[in-house]
Amino acid sequence: MKGTKEYLKIKNWAEEDRPREKLLLKSKSALSDAELIGILIGSGTSSMSAVDVAKSILNHTGNDLNNLAKLSVKELMKFKGIGEAKAISIVSAMELGRRRKETQSTKKPKITCSEDAYEAIKPELMDMKHEEFWTLLLSRSNTIIKKQLISSGGVAGTVADPKIIFKSALEELACTIILVHNHPSGNLRPSQADINLTKKMKAAGDLLEIPVLDHLIFTDNGYFSFADENML
């Protein structure tokens, strides 16, 4: 019915219920996740408002913004009412949120335990769907000099070349390093290749007097520490 379609248009809602007006009248914190995403989307379909479209996306992701951040432009475009431009707006907003977390602290973090290392590398590896290998280059006081991307691969693995790893450590005058690679599958168990690589890196670090303090296997929901498990 035409009356039903007209009602579904946000412009026909009471002013205090429209997402943009609600943000102006009240505050951004008064809006639900669906309303905020509805503002990004801007418009819905003939049968769904922008907020309804947002609700359908959130329902698909279990109402978890972390899961929403993992969706690509193409995946978002599968939802009714989401074209390329709207999908790009959502992906851009999620990326800005991730970068904000990364820049919240201007002070270089000090690594005192495996959890500190996990939190430090989280902005780079959270929501990553392919495998990457990183190093944390540390000063004598264990503060991070630099977070260095070594290699980026596919879903199944990536290459970690000791020459590249220790070249960057030498160039930055790092005193110690921590190795990190992610498992997009969420599996925290180290493979035999992970174990062999760790032994090789540990030996190389000892030879160059740049000790490898730890090797973390990163997942969005936790990590495995070779040091904590006495495997270094």
Image (cartoon, grey):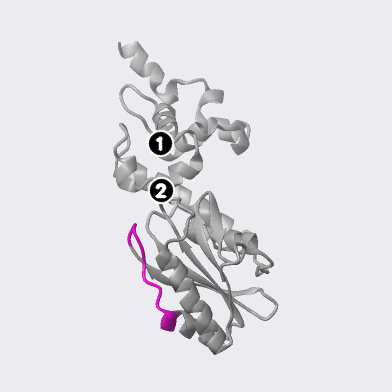
Q: Is residue 128 left or right of 229 when viewed as pictured?
A: left
Q: Confirm whether residue 103 shows in the render.
A: no
* Vertical position of residue 118 compared to residue 208: above or below: above
Q: Is residue 188 left or right of 119 when viewed as pictured?
A: left
What's under tag 1, amino acid-wise? Gly
* Magenta stretch, residue numbers: 154-164
Residue 52 rendering spot, x and y as whole percentages: 41, 26
Residue 69 rendering spot, x and y as whole percentages: 45, 46
Q: Is residue 161 a member of the stretch shown in magenta?
A: yes
Task: Identify residue for label 2.
Answer: 91
Mark 2 to mark 1: distance in Å?
15 Å
Tell whether label 1 touches label 2 (CB within 8 Å).
no
* Vertical position of residue 35 compared to residue 155: above or below: above
What's under tag 2, amino acid-wise? Val
Could you tell me what secondary structure mostly forms the magenta stretch? loop
At horizontal 41% and vertical 48% (from top left) the residue drawn is 91
Task: Identify residue for label 1.
Answer: 42
Q: Confirm whether residue 56 shows in the render.
A: yes
Q: Secondary structure at mark 1?
A: loop
Image quarter of the N terminus: top left
At horizontal 66% and vertical 67% (from top left) the residue drawn is 109
Residue 98 rendering spot, x and y as whole percentages: 52, 54
- Count the numbered circles shown: 2
Residue 116 rendering spot, x and y as whole percentages: 64, 62
Q: Secondary structure at mark 2?
A: helix
